[in-house]
Image (cartoon, rainbow, N blue to C red):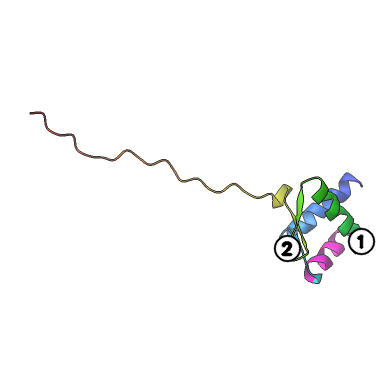
Amino acid sequence: MEDADLVAFDEAVASVGCDLVSESDYLPVEFQTGMTRPMLQEIAGYRIATDKGVRLESGGFRLTSGPCAPTAPATEPAALPSETPEAPEA
């Protein structure tokens, strides 16, 4: 498997939303890469084996690397100390 093929695959899959599930996902990826369906399935299997993709419960594939890498959830900013007036001295 050529590095150029992997890059083309990743870019094409990202362009369709990172999932390969149905005909409407596969056709544009086939067109963009010039690869056949079996070639795409072979690369998807390779991406799964190298932890750069996952099988979907629906039977499809999701790319999880490069432009399709999951982002960490945003963290909330630390709370500011409450601004309570100081008690007057007695």
Disc 2 from disc 1: Cα separation: 20 Å
Q: How many marks?
A: 2
Residue 83 counted in the magenta span: no
> In this rendering, would 18 be left or right of 34?
left
Residue type for callout 2 = Glu
- Name which quarter of the figure residue 28 lies in: bottom right
- Residue at 83% x, 68% y is 27
x and y percentages locating residue 89 in the rendered image: 11, 29
Seen from the viewer's position, the closer of residues 12 and 87 is 87
Q: Secondary structure at mark 1?
A: helix
Q: Residues within 10 Å of mark 2 (few under 14, many from 20)?
A: few
Q: Which disc number belongs to residue 38?
A: 1
Assign the magenta stretch its main secondary structure.
helix
- Residue at 87% x, 44% y is 3
Q: Residue furthest bottom?
A: 23
For disc 2, the marked residue is 57
Query: Quarter of the image containing the C terminus?
Result: top left
Q: Which region shows up in magenta? A: 24-37
Sequence-earlier tag: 2 or 1: 1
Residue type for callout 1 = Pro
- Residue at 92% x, 61% y is 38
* Above or below 52: residue 22: below
